[in-house]
Image (cartoon, rainbow, N blue to C red):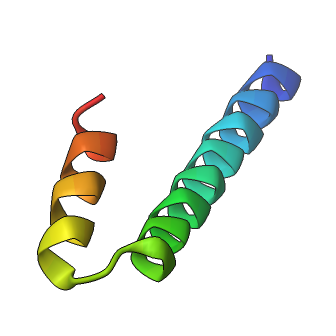
């Protein structure tokens, strides 16, 4: 059972890292803060 929990924790950690990378990518590619806010909000409400 511990192995399953550890795998679950790893999956959560990787998902959080991927989401952080997506947000950073959005921030770099947007022209202004308003566009970035809209795109990040859309990502987080998926």
- The residue at 87%/26% (across/down) is 3
Locate residue 22, reporting x and y percent: 54, 58
44 vs 28, left or right, is left
19 relative to 29, above or below: above
Residue 34 against residue 43 in the figure, above or below? below
Residue sitting at x 22%, y 35%? 45
Residue 42 locus on image (x, y percent):
23, 42
Q: Locate residue 42 relative to residue 30 in the image: left or right.
A: left
Q: Dividing the image into 4 quarters, which one contains the C terminus? A: top left
Identify which residue is drawn at 80% across, 30% down.
Answer: 7
**Which quadrant is home to the N terminus?**
top right
Picture layout, residue 8 above or below residue 27: above
In this picture, residue 25 sits left or right of residue 40: right
Tell me if residue 25 comes above or below residue 19 in the rendering. Answer: below
Q: Nearer the viewer, residue 45 or 8?
A: 45
The percent position of residue 44, horizontal first and vertical second, equals 28, 44
Question: How many dots with numbers?
Answer: 0
Which residue is more in the foreground, 31 or 37?
Answer: 31
Task: State the residue in front, 40 or 6.
Answer: 40
Q: Residue furthest front?
A: 31
């Amino acid at each position: 059972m511990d192995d399953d929990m550890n795998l679950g924790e790893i999956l959560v950690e990787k998902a959080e890292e991927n989401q952080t990378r997506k947000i950073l990518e959005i921030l770099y590619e947007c022209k202004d803060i308003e566009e970035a806010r809209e795109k990040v909000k859309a990502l987080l409400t998926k």
